[in-house]
Image: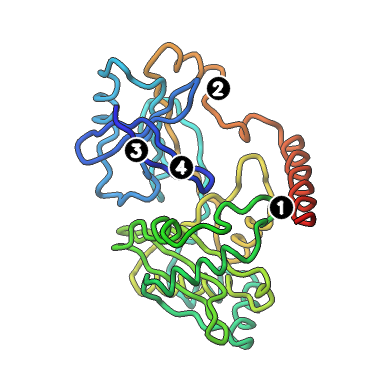
Amino acid sequence: MNNHEISVKGKILKVPSISIHDSVVVVKGKLIKKAEIFDEYWCESNHLPNYLTVLEEISQRSNKPDIFTFTQRIPDTEIRYEYHAEWVNYAVIILNSYDTWINNQISNAAKRNIKASVKRGVEVRVCEFDNDYVKGIMSIYNETPIRQGRKFWHYEKCFDAVQAENGTYKSRSTYLGAYYEGEMIGYLKIVWDENSAGIMQILSKINSYNKRPNDALLAEAVKQCCTRGIKYLIYENFVYGRKAESSLTDFKRGHGFTKMDVPQYFVPLTLKGFVALRLGLHKSFKEIVPFWLTSRLLNIRAKCYERSLLKT
């Protein structure tokens, strides 16, 4: 096996990898080794390899991983393979036109916030991914070391790291910036596919919250999609783990995102993988632990971070 770099919680790690044709399959995990196509979520759908071909090649290796997993793409929601499948949810806006979105699909609060951002002087524009744009991202990253009650992974990262992380898939990405009096107060990155687009990042300065830059950025993202004839705008998950409600879920719901489930398949390749799959050990910690316990742990973590911030 070779090694391939992946980003985990803002850090670059090297993991074992297998090259199959033009694709890279990465292997994660220590006790249970799971293989998946690198950046499968962000790959162009018409450039994805045949899953069965990848599965066949991996299964024939002497040092094969324990489980191979792959996920169908939006809007393909029907189960198509006879392997163990579990549902993965995504936040998706089904687009017709910008007028339909703003008049029929979003909440009244979202409409007011989009109007408020304009009245308060926020300007959103398509930007070049140049040094000034990267420095603008850094100014947002470095505003605070803690966001939403947890340590912010990107705080005080160097220029080269910020440029590299945000420059992925640059040839098929659009970068938006929200500006107030010449200062970047928010940014959004869209990655384009044939019939869909994914929001890779949307972030704004906390001290500019009342100017509603995120609402303005999302509205412009929808405009860009409609101009290109994109049918589906995807923004990661609608629900995260067992946390049925959150401020991020509320934001997505208010802006017209709906929950769309697609099947993720898990194929055991070893006896260990078969046993792990039967016992549910292929799942993440968040998926196994009850939400009441997870929420308490998160609250404790948030208080610890707040105390550490006050001491500095």
Position of 298 relative to 144 (above/below): above
Marked residue nearer the N-terminal end (1 or 2): 1
- In the picture of the structure, the residue carrying the numbered disc 4 is 262
Type of the residue with mark 2 = Leu
- In the picture of the structure, the residue carrying the numbered disc 1 is 149
Q: Residues within 10 Å of mark 2 (few under 14, many from 20)?
A: some
Marked residue nearer the N-terminal end (3 or 1): 3
Type of the residue with mark 4 = Val
- In the picture of the structure, the residue carrying the numbered disc 2 is 281
Residues at marks 4 and 3 touching, judged by CB atoms closer than 8 Å = no
90 left or right of 150 in image: left
Q: Residue at x 75, y 34 (%)?
A: 293
Q: Position of residue 55 (x, y in %)?
A: 29, 27
Query: From the image, which quarter does the N terminus lie in?
Result: top left
Gap in angstroms between the C-alphas marked 4 and 1: 30 Å
- In the picture of the structure, the residue carrying the numbered disc 3 is 4
Q: Residues within 10 Å of mark 4 (few under 14, many from 20)?
A: many
Gap in angstroms between the C-alphas marked 3 and 2: 24 Å
